[in-house]
Amino acid sequence: MLIDRSASLHSLRRTRARHISYGMNHMLLRSQAFINGAWRDARDRRTFAVHNPSTGELVGTVADLGRDDTRDAIEAAHAAWPAWRARTAKERAEILRQWFALILEHRHVLAELMSRESGKVLTESLGEVTYGASFVEWFAEEGKRAYGDVIPPHTRDRRLVVIKQGVGVAAAITPWNFPLAMITRKVAPALAAGCPVVIKPPAETPLTALALAVLADAAGMPAGVYNTVTTTRSHDVGLELCEHPLVRKLSFTGSTAVGKQLMAQCAPTLKRVSLELGGNAPFIVFDDADLDAAVQGAVQSKFRHNGQTCVCVNRVLVQRTVYDDFVARFAAAVSALRTGDVLDPSVQVGPLISEKALHKVQAFVHDAVEHGAQIVEGGVHRGGLFYAPTVLANATPSMRIAREEVFGPVAPIFAFDTEAEAIAMANDTTYGLAAYFYSRDVGRCWRVAEALEYGMVGVNEGLISTELAPFGGIKESGMGREGSRYGLEQYLETKYLCFGGV
Ligand code: SIN
């Protein structure tokens, strides 16, 4: 069904989000994909079901698109490109700002939908809507500052100029742990730079992505500029996005293994790629740290979305002189976390996303205990996909959790003696996304911040994400940056113009 834009905008406006509890009939709940300004099924009519990880309830049924459908979306985006890039940045910003306003206006419905399909607790889902919307607002403005350059020439009769132009059709493959913000963080800069987008949301959370498409359409996005391809056929759809020559840029957030595969698939057409991949974040507590602040930062960073973010703490490294004190305080704070119904605003920790994730967490805890770790808190399955927030003392580098990303609510605590040892332990990983440390010695803060081989470092801070700063990793955590002016660069080509005979 196609929605009439003025009617939909009107009824969206009438929707007072705070009065609405999300229901199956709400107009933001869609079952079809969005291609070339129209809602449509898969050509072969396949569909798939979306379940609530918290309760197992059916949340919705969605069109399961394949390679041909994806090709339609790419071609529609390419056809829409000339008119979209011809608009001024200010004209594009007007639509983006309208989209931003609509997202915020419907934040309660979006958050509830997100919680139901992803198992994210409601307070965090509300936070994610605001966080996600902030990228739209920020890039609406930053698109106006895609400045070029004038270079003093090397001969009198020449003028050398650099201009910035959008790369063309941009594909975004997004993860389930941030059903909304990872879409806006990729597509807002693309759209601001004049690039049409084809989004492939994950099979776990397609409904939030479709709700965003409803709002993008209502905001006035021209047909073909914004496309959403829902699918369980990730391999086929991913292959089409990587291999199609009309796609000029791929941005992916997900595992390192899949990121490497996508990069290889993009190589024959030499696409530009941005990859935001896995991490193995260390959280270092020096003995000169404010321990209460460190405990608070560690709890926030470790248990955000139940440990299921790429920047969640994976290893807590504590100086031996304060080790026992920190472990006791941290375990007490973790035991106070409330687990339960994700729609209850007082609940802080929800379920894991899947059985596979639950088994991985259990296997990591089992392996750590076999290698000598002591369970200080948690360590138990609480039914369904719920696993108790867990603290493991006496962790050592021989454990799996020291090397691999647990992506769950388990905090292993390692001991170290010196600053040099802490840095060496923190850097002893193939990953390089986020790292954190706590110290009140300003000299040490500089030394350690510079020595950590990571794309992002939180110094006396456990939550560092914002639309204003560059998000991204080094080593096998990926390449490219999202958010900030660096995020816009990812969707711009640099063109040099040489004017002769002046
Ligand atoms: C992620 O886990 O991929 C994103 C986390 C964030 O934006 O803070």
Image (cartoon, grey):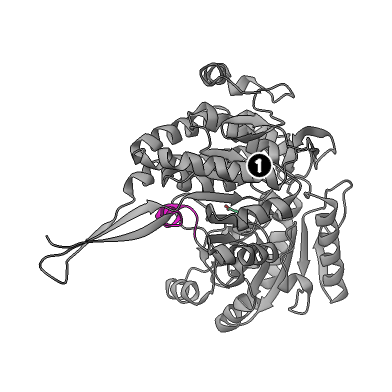
The residue depicted at 78 percent of the width and 33 percent of the height is 59
* Residue at the disc numbered 1: 229
Q: Position of residue 302 (x, y in %)?
A: 67, 58
Residue 488 painted magenta: yes
Describe residue 422's horizontal placement relative to residue 272 as left or right. Answer: right
Q: Position of residue 431 (x, y in %)?
A: 62, 71
The residue depicted at 46 percent of the width and 42 percent of the height is 81
Above or below, 13 against 295 in this view is above
| CB of mark 1 near ligand 1 (< 8 Å) | no
Residue at the limit of the structure toward the front, as seen here: 501
User: Mark 1 belongs to which amino acid?
Assistant: Val
Describe residue 375's horizontal placement relative to residue 182 as left or right. Answer: right
Q: Quadrant of the C terminus?
A: bottom left
Residue 241 painted magenta: no
* Magenta span: 481-491
Q: How many other residues sit within 10 Å of disc 1, few (<14), some (14-19) or many (≥20)?
A: many
Q: Position of residue 359 (x, y in %)?
A: 86, 58
Q: Nearer the viewer, residue 252 or 370?
A: 252
Residue 131 is at least partly visible in this image? no
Describe residue 487's horizontal placement relative to residue 232 as left or right. Answer: left
Q: Nearer the viewer, residue 343 or 403?
A: 403
Q: Quadrant of the N terminus?
A: top right
Q: Mark 1: which secondary structure?
A: loop
The residue depicted at 73 percent of the width and 34 percent of the height is 343
